[in-house]
């Protein structure tokens, strides 16, 4: 199936022609075949899958390196980002794909370090929705998405406001194996003071 024809699209910043790929099969999406503002799901554009303020500040290339990464990220956008948008309204993901160079910069690791984060394969996103408590968002994702690999409520501390922290959601692409449907929280251990992963979705321990 060929991609649909280009359609005019007006943006407040610029006027340009974009292509609507929201119905294009994942397998038909290829490196070099998408422009930054091309539509990849009804409410998300291609550039949102690789956008990173840190990468821009540091001059780090955060583009997809393989078609598997690109296709996994688009699958994630359609199956995770879009349903959340349909339910709660407009938002942009904090982070989706992260290159190894960006992971090293983010986590302050040496050049020899290799991240195993699902962000590096295009299979994970970090999201917040304005006006929706982070823990409520995590619980909605678990209850309403048809599938997920991991949902992690990260750094949610209600004493710092309902939008503190973020929700990490991962989803394996088709053909890669079954999703584990793991629910975790990343909170501060009251005894050691260190951040730890614990089972279940919860707020930070007081």
Image (cartoon, grey):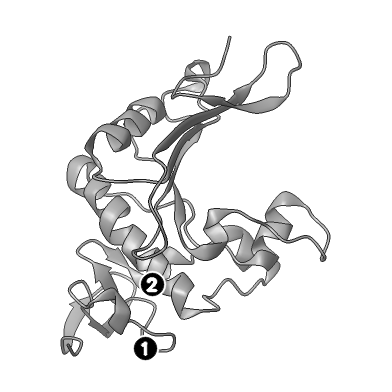
Q: Position of residue 154 (x, y in %)?
A: 52, 33
Q: Which mark is residue 71?
A: 2
Q: Distance between the residues labelled 1 and 2?
A: 12 Å
**Residue 41, picture quadrant:** bottom left
Quadrant where the N terminus lies? bottom left
Which is more toward the observer, 186 or 129?
Answer: 186
Q: 163 above or below 69?
A: above
Q: Residue at x 35, y 67 (%)?
A: 74
Residue topped by disc 1: 33
Residue 57 appears in the rendering: no
Q: Do labels 1 and 2 touch, CB within 8 Å?
A: no
Identified at 33% across, 29% down, the residue is 139
Whole-percent x and y of residue 123?
Answer: 45, 58
Is residue 65 positioned above or below 80 on the image? Answer: below
**Residue 124's mark?**
none
Q: Where is residue 157 in the image (x, y as percent from the top left)?
A: 52, 21
- 17 or 64, which lies in front? 64
Q: Examine the rendering and report whether any part of residue 33 can be seen.
A: yes
The quadrant the C terminus occupies is top right
x 47%, y 71%: residue:
69
Q: Considering only vertical position in the picture, is 160 above or below 3?
A: above
Displayed quadrant of residue 61:
bottom right
Q: How crowded is mark 2: few (under 14 residues within 10 Å), some or many (20 or more)?
A: many
Q: Nearer the viewer, residue 195 or 181?
A: 181
């Amino acid at each position: 199936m060929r991609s649909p024809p280009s359609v005019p699209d007006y943006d407040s910043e610029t006027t340009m022609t974009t292509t609507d790929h929201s119905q294009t099969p994942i397998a038909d999406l290829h490196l070099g075949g998408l422009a930054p503002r091309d539509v990849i799901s009804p409410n998300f554009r291609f550039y949102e899958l690789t956008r990173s303020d840190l990468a821009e500040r540091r001059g780090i290339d955060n583009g997809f390196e393989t078609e598997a990464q690109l296709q996994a990220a688009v699958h994630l956008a359609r199956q995770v980002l879009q349903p959340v948008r349909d339910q709660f309204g407009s938002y942009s993901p904090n982070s989706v794909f992260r290159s190894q160079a960006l992971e090293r910069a983010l986590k302050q690791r040496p050049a020899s370090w290799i991240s195993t984060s699902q962000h590096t394969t295009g299979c994970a996103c970090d999201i917040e929705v304005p006006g929706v408590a982070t823990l409520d968002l995590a619980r909605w994702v678990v209850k309403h998405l048809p599938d997920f690999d991991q949902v992690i409520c990260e750094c949610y501390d209600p004493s710092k406001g309902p939008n503190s922290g973020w929700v990490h959601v991962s989803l394996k692409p088709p053909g890669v194996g079954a999703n584990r449907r793991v629910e975790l929280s990343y909170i501060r251990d009251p005894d050691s003071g260190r951040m730890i992963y614990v089972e279940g979705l919860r707020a930070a321990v007081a």
